Image: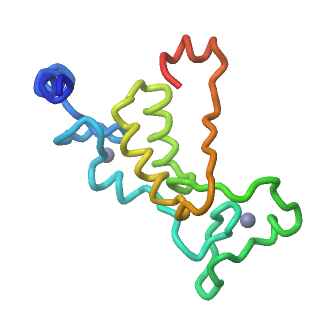
Amino acid sequence: MLREALRPVVDLVYPPRCPLCGAGLAAQDGLCAYCWAELAIPGEPSCAKYQRPFGDGVPVGAICLPCLGDPPKHDGIAAGTLYNEASRKLVLAFKHGRRIALARLLAGLMAARLPPIEGQWMVVPVSLHRWRLWRRGFN
Ligand SMILES: [Zn+2]
Ligand SMILES: [Zn+2]
């Protein structure tokens, strides 16, 4: 409630800008339409272990050759976006540019790629070293 009440003041002092190109935005936690289109959102079909994209015609659940040759020791990972210049800038803006308002957008991108929860899950955050946590201010 306090956050909502202070939003106009924050927006006045720090006008919302796209973290990738600097274009004006309506809210602190988004991207402009151009930069949003530059993100490469993974889709299907893709490798069931690393979400490496496949061409058309590969069945869902297939595993890529590198994963077959050297099977990972986990059940799979989920990526919110494929790595490209736009995703690199987005993560750097969040991690090192102190654009913490991007957390909701990044969490939404990752949550959209998680498989349906079946059975028991354990989500484990990767903790920062205490000195990095102290320098960055958040984990
Ligand atoms: Zn932009
Ligand atoms: Zn793979």
Q: Residue at x 29, y 44 (%)?
A: 30
Location of residue 107 by image quarter: top left
Q: In terms of depth relative to the viewer, which is nearer, 63 or 86?
A: 63
Q: Position of residue 57 (x, y in %)?
A: 61, 88
| Image height of 139 relative to 89, above or below | above
| Image height of 64 relative to 89, above or below | below
Q: Position of residue 26 (x, y in %)?
A: 16, 42
| Image height of 118 relative to 136, above or below | below
Q: Residue at x 63, y 64 (%)?
A: 51
Count the marks: 0
Left or right relative to 79: residue 72: right
Left or right relative to 12: residue 43: right
Q: Position of residue 106 (x, y in %)?
A: 43, 45
What is the residue that sits farthest to the front in this orientation?
Answer: 119
Q: Position of residue 48 (x, y in %)?
A: 67, 68
Location of residue 7 by image quarter: top left
Left or right relative to 21: residue 75: right
What's the colour scheme?
A: rainbow
Q: In terms of depth relative to the viewer, which is nearer, 65 or 118?
A: 118
Q: Residue at x 81, y 65 (%)?
A: 66
What is the residue that sits farthest to the bottom in this orientation?
Answer: 57
Q: Residue at x 38, y 29 (%)?
A: 99
Q: In terms of depth relative to the viewer, which is nearer, 12 or 70?
A: 70
Q: In terms of depth relative to the viewer, which is nearer, 15 or 51?
A: 51
Query: Can you say which quadrant of the picture contains the N terminus?
Result: top left
| Image height of 78 relative to 123, above or below | below
Left or right relative to 75: residue 115: left
